[in-house]
Amino acid sequence: MLIDSHAHLEMPEFRQDLTEVIQRAKASGVEYIFTVGTEKKDWTRALEIAHSYPSVYAVLGVHPHNAREIDEETYPTLRKLCADDKVRAYGEIGLDFYRNLSPQDVQLKRFREQTQFARELGLPIVVHDREAHQETLGVLKSEKAEDCGGIIHCFSGDYHMAKECIEMGFCISIPGTVTFKKTGEFHEIIKRLPLESLLIETDAPFLAPVPFRGKRNEPSYVRYTAQKVAEIKKVSLEKVAEVTTENAIRVYRLKC
Ligand SMILES: [Zn+2]
Ligand SMILES: [Zn+2]
């Protein structure tokens, strides 16, 4: 059994064949999928999908790309939606200093604010960090993120950062990019991290692993990421599946 800890099933890329995508995941051993609604227009769709398919859960929040769209209605709306039992975490929130679709100062302000909001809601957070490692760590520390814990999704930091995040109660989520060539440094980091702190994810429809690189990603492909993690850590695929599944159940507090 595998869990795709992070996907975006509400995105238009899945509008045509969502049921088949979820069935293919099941057939590949992917028991649960966490779909992340990153902006206002996606929240209700993500929840709808979670309610239509027993294997799908939702994560809701405002992505750093959309940080500048937060207004006075955002938090009251999210407070209502997040009360739903199918919502298992708050996110993805964080910093993206690569694309800078919202100004950096706005991203920082909203990341701090949303971390506090998640703590108030009693939900773990799903963190997006692209080219903002030091700043991300800084916010996690200053906003006492160890109180809620959560996941650093699509991890791209160094070993030191991973270790600090794990000490704050976070899991490190490995995306399909781990199957690409020229990722030796990332492999070394994974080798040194305890399997008990790792998750696997697709971030579908983005970041498809080899042999589907460049195509639309989907949750069934999380198996290729699990396989690569098994090779790197020199353990069986079954072991990676078992432990990362336990980790996801723990961090998302699933009752199963
Ligand atoms: Zn992300
Ligand atoms: Zn994402």
Image (cartoon, rainbow, N blue to C red):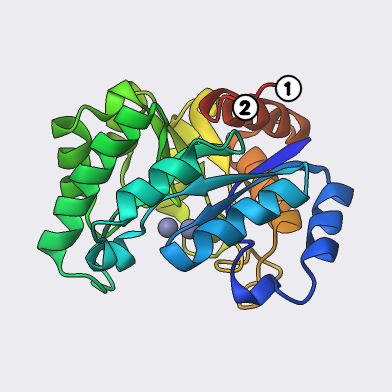
In front here: 33 or 212? 33
Residue type pointed to by label 2: Ile
Q: Can you give x and y, in whole percent of width and height, for residue 83 in the image?
A: 50, 35
Residue 208, image quadrant: bottom right
Residue 175 against residue 66 in the figure, above or below: above
Q: Which residue is mark 1?
A: 256
The answer to whether one can see residue 202 in this image is no
Q: Residue at x 15, y 61 (%)?
A: 106
Which image quarter holds the C terminus? top right
Q: Which mark is residue 249?
A: 2
Q: Can you give x and y, in whole percent of width and height, for residue 172 in the image?
A: 45, 38
Whichever of labels 2 and 1 marks the residue nearer the N terminus, that label is 2
Q: Can you give x and y, in whole percent of width and height, for residue 27 in the image?
A: 89, 50
Q: Can you give x and y, in whole percent of width and height, for residue 75 in the image?
A: 31, 48
Do callouts 2 and 1 mark residues in contact (Cβ within 8 Å)? yes
Q: What element does badge 1 sit on?
A: loop
Residue 93 against residue 120 in the figure, above or below: below
